[in-house]
């Protein structure tokens, strides 16, 4: 195949216009630039696959500040780059994690700056489990680890509330059921209804705001939050984290009454008490007035009977006391006590005398022993005790003395002071 090649000189004149043959160009009718061929491939790919579902495993999940989600879909032998733009990503209820298998739906296209084909995901769900169910499990695990479901955080419900707050839709069947039950059980209790959306966009935010605002009211004793039955999607507002945290942070006890008995929401798990249905919430929040009145009457009768019996016992005891001889003759008892006191004083006197006598004998014995060891006994036998006049220490050997020292010689009846003039030493 031949191509026409044209070359121009700086003046703009055609210098060469000839045909030439490329050896590898057989069957090629036109040459494309990179941008041109990329656009054609992009157009062809988008035309051929405008809407496609792909199953694969997630890896390399990235979420930059733009809010878009970038990830790779892969299986055992191939991988595909994918992107979820911010608007679509904001609708995903569960958290994307590496290794998760998903069913994704969207369109194939080409990212021209890199010449790379990619999958634009508009919607996705986890393989084998619904997206909402996975989101429920993920949030449940997260809040359970934080302790929001712990029994230690549950507040007791008041036995007879003065004022009840109810947060629900004012047009739903739930509010009618709750009001009917409360009116039948305890008709005179005060009720404050806070109307909110219970499903759809913005419902969770309204419910959360209502809980927070109602907690600022000092006269509310208990709050009922809930709605009637519905699908998982209908009840989803009560599975949102914002509602769960508002319930947990509330200072007023909260009853969660969402759906039917088989419907368990995050709100049910965080609340201080779960009602299986809105009707049961009405039963939990107030007691039956007729049974309460009957109980009060029975308690009143038992109290009256108990007081009557107590009064009778006390009257009988008082009668026995008044009939007592000591009460009738109080001086006689006083005289007996006085006589008893005299006996005790006499016994104390004798015991004291005996004790003093015994101890005196012991003292005399010890004194005799001590006296036998006294130096004065030695003096009585004609001996003397010589001490240094200066130190008053006994002198037991002549070697400690020198000429001119003064000594004191103690006799039985006195002492003399001497000055040493000379020494007479024994031969021994």
Image (cartoon, rainbow, N blue to C red):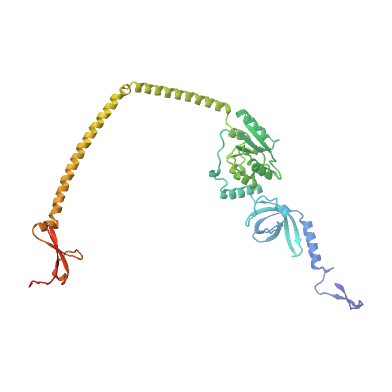
Please give the name of the residue rendered at 74% of the width and 61% of the height, measured from the top-left corner: 117
The image shows residue 353 at horizontal and vertical percentages of: 19, 39
Residue 318 quadrant: top left
Rendering coords of residue 419 (x, y %): 15, 68
Q: Quick check: 12 left or right of 222?
A: right
Frontmost residue, 337 versus 121: 337
Quadrant of the image for the N terminus?
bottom right
Which image quadrant for residue 271?
top right
Of 243 and 192, nearer the camera is 192
| Residue appearing at x 61%, y 50% in the figure | 138
Residue name at image x 79 percent, y 67 percent: 34
Q: Is residue 267 visible?
A: yes
| Residue 232 visible within the image | no
Taking the view exactly as shown, the residue that stands out farthest to the left is 427
* Number of marks in picture: 0
Seen in the picture, residue 131 relative to 62 is either above or below; the reply is: above
Which of these two is toward me, 214 or 424? 424
Q: Is residue 347 left or right of residue 62?
A: left
Q: Nearer the viewer, residue 190 or 94?
A: 190
> In which quadrant of the rendered image does the C terminus lie?
bottom left
Which x, y percent locates residue 146?
Answer: 57, 50
């Amino acid at each position: 195949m031949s191509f026409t090649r044209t070359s121009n000189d700086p003046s703009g004149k055609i210098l060469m216009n000839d045909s030439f043959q490329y050896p590898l160009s057989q069957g090629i009718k036109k040459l494309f630039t990179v941008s041109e061929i990329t656009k054609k491939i992009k157009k062809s790919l988008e035309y051929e696959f405008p809407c496609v579902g792909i199953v694969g495993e997630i890896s390399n999940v990235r979420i930059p500040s733009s809010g878009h989600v970038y990830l790779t879909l892969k299986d055992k032998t191939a991988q595909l780059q994918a992107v979820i733009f911010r608007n679509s990503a904001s609708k995903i209820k569960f958290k994307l994690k590496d290794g998760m298998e998903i069913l994704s739906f969207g369109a194939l296209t080409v990212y021209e700056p890199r010449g790379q084909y990619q999958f634009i995901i508009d919607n996705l769900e986890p393989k084998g489990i619904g997206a909402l169910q996975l989101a429920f499990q993920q949030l449940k695990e997260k809040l359970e680890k934080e302790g929001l479901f712990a029994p230690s955080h549950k507040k007791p419900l008041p036995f007879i509330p003065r004022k009840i707050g109810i947060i629900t839709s004012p047009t739903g069947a739930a509010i009618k059921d709750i009001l009917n039950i409360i009116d039948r059980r305890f008709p005179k209790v005060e009720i404050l209804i806070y109307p909110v959306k219970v499903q759809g966009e913005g419902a969770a935010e309204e419910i959360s705001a209502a809980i927070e605002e109602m907690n600022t009211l000092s006269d509310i004793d208990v709050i009922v939050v809930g709605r009637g039955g519905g699908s998982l999607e209908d009840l989803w507002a009560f599975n949102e984290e914002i509602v769960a945290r508002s319930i947990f942070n509330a200072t007023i006890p909260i009853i969660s009454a969402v759906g039917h008995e088989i419907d368990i929401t995050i709100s049910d798990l965080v609340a201080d008490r779960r009602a299986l249905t809105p009707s049961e919430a009405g039963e939990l929040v107030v007691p039956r007035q007729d049974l309460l009145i009957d109980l009060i009457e029975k308690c009143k009768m038992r109290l009256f009977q108990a007081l009557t019996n107590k009064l009778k016992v006390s009257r009988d005891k008082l009668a026995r006391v008044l009939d007592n001889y000591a009460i009738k003759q109080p001086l006689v008892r006083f005289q007996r006590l006085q006589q008893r006191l005299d006996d005790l004083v006499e016994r104390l006197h004798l015991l004291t005398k005996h004790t003093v006598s015994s101890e005196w004998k012991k003292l005399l014995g010890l004194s005799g022993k001590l006296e036998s060891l006294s130096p004065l006994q030695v003096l009585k036998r004609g001996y003397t005790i010589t001490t240094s006049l200066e130190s008053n220490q006994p002198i037991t050997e002549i070697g400690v003395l020198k000429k001119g020292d003064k000594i004191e010689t103690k006799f039985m009846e006195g002492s003399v002071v001497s000055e040493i003039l000379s020494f007479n030493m024994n031969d021994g």
